[in-house]
Amino acid sequence: MPEIVDRAFDPQARDSLQRRGLHPALARVFAARGIASLEQLDTSLTRLHEPGAMRNLAQMGQVLADAIAQRSKLLIVGDYDCDGATASAVGMLALRAFGAQVDYLVPNRFEFGYGLTPEIVRVAAQRRPDYLITVDNGIASVEGVAEANRLGMRVLVTDHHLPGDALPAAACIINPNQAGCGFPSKHLAGVGVMFYAMLQLRAELRARGQFAGGEEPNLAQLLDLVALGTVADVVRLDQNNRVLVHQGLARIRAGRGRPGIRALIQIAGRDPAAAGSYDLGFVVGPRLNAAGRLEDMSIGVECLLAEGDSAAQELARRLDELNRERRGIEAQMHEDARVHLADLDPGEAWGVALYDEGWHQGVIGILAARVREQVHRPVIAFAPGGGDELKGSGRSIPGLHLRDALDLIDKRHAGLLRRFGGHAAAAGVTIDRADFARFRTVFDETVRGLVSPADLERRIETDGELAPADMNIGLASQLSEFVWGQGFPAPVFRGRFRVLAQRVVGSGHLKLRLAPIHAGLEGLPVDAMLFGRDEAIPDQVLAVFRLDVNEWNGARSVQLVLDSWDAAGSARPVAAQLA
């Protein structure tokens, strides 16, 4: 088992939260996540940041309002992942409701690559739009915007990715991460940026009297889409994003979500009325992403736009089939990666680059994530990209900002990277096929210069020991009510247990009966699950676990879900709290 480290917390914040009525365990959990007041946990819509601080947002609203008034043709150009699909759907639904002439185009990743490339601009021009509106891309599309300008189309960029050295010559750019933008939340997903654009457009149309005498569109109806894209894009869940996700999940649970989201949850055998962040990130998101990875994301967008259950269910079935196909491809690629890793000493390699001629370009990001989990190193996996190109997708560890690392490589080794972009945790890069060996060496050298040996040590952060009396359905239910995710991780606890009973259930999972051992005393037994294991575990274990609500035949009970474990006598000692 890796080293177990308890998250540090502010005792004053914990005590303050506890005095306000929070359960002691919850108070510690939230204090460890920087929460000092109950107001920071408020997820009502009134807590959303006002649009006014976002640079160029007022101008964006004016340009779009003018375009609607002039009956200009708008074409949304999206990205081929879940964030891009939801952002496209938000734009389509809102702009239609505002009376715009609007359509969308999602580039095929295998033909056109990422973003507003000159090639996709020429395809878009065949529809004769007056405006191109990018969603979840465009901030780095200098050449694509130039081509659009040359062809007589104006470009409106809505994006959240980090800008490069030069901005495109677009008619208007909104991006909370561009220089000079004072918007407090820098972690909006692409769909969040598009949602704010539509809020501003509605305010502009309201000021112009467009809704006089009539009911204005209720943009809250789009919050399930915003929640989905936000969770699936693994952006940091600051308070603003937690509000968006909480409100979107509330709509889904109440049966007021989009038919396509409901159908995608149901086809996985889950209940929309009990939907949580897990369903968005690990049930709906992967099925939508499968379309962009293997075929055409327009299938996913059409599913999100579907107005009736029948059409939504048919499209959800197709997305589910694509996801099953994706899983099969991924499993084979993972086996291939094991072969490549057999010749690699993880202790020697700090940054890992892998390539196989048979790998699928649409699945290398998932593969990189799987290998990263295995070796706890930044990993970039490459696949053939057509011609003499290799397309790479990378995933990083907490100690390395991957996009910044690629930027450093680009500055130090001019010409090695054809294109790159992304975030701290994930990024994409294109290189020449002949340069793979050189890139592998340079990437490893660059990582060595940016991280410390401690960054390469796998650690498990927990919220400390949980008293046996707190392993109950009440606390488990309270935990399930909050939004957890990137930057606001779901609570995990540590403890010692005696294993009273264990048996294999389902397709290779252990169902356990555990007695917690706390302060030398044995507590009341509790049920637990250890997924993905069908071999018996020792009689006593040190475990890291989550509290979960088990629903069976209409009854609700608490169960522990073990994330990791070790024999109690051989486990590494718990380290001091994180600084």
Image: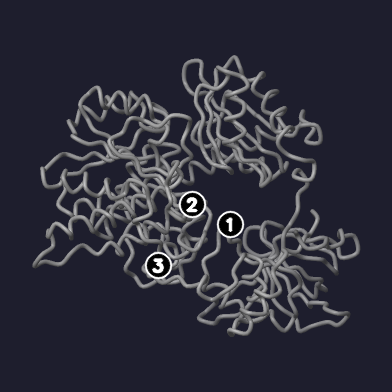
Is residue 389 shown to the viewer in this render? yes
Mark nearest the camera among 2 and 3 is 2
Circle 3 is placed at which residue position?
247
The residue located at (36%, 68%) in the rendering is 251
- Amino acid of disc 2: His
The secondary element bearing badge 3 is classed as helix
Circle 2 is placed at which residue position?
187
x then y, percent, for residue 505: 66, 65
The residue located at (42%, 66%) in the rendering is 249
x then y, percent, for residue 325: 48, 42
Q: Which dot marks residue 487?
A: 1
Label 1 packing within 10 angstroms: few (<14), some (14-19), many (20+): few
Contact? badges 1 and 2 (CB < 8 Å): yes
Residue 101 in the figure: left or right of residue 340: left
- Amino acid of disc 3: Gln
The residue located at (66%, 76%) in the rendering is 14
Mark nearest the camera among 1 and 3 is 1
- Amino acid of disc 1: Gly
Instruction: Work out how far the residue at label 1 is from the one at label 2, CA to CA, in angstroms.
Output: 10 Å
Contact? badges 1 and 3 (CB < 8 Å): no
Q: Nearer the viewer, residue 194 or 408?
A: 408
Specify which label sits upstream in the sequence, 2 or 3. 2
Label 2 packing within 10 angstroms: few (<14), some (14-19), many (20+): many
The secondary element bearing badge 1 is classed as loop
x then y, percent, for residue 170: 31, 33
x then y, percent, for residue 332: 60, 36
Residue lying farthest right? 569
Q: Quadrant of the N terminus?
A: bottom right
Instruction: Work out how far the residue at label 1 is from the one at label 3, CA to CA, in angstroms.
Output: 19 Å
Specify which label sits upstream in the sequence, 1 or 2. 2
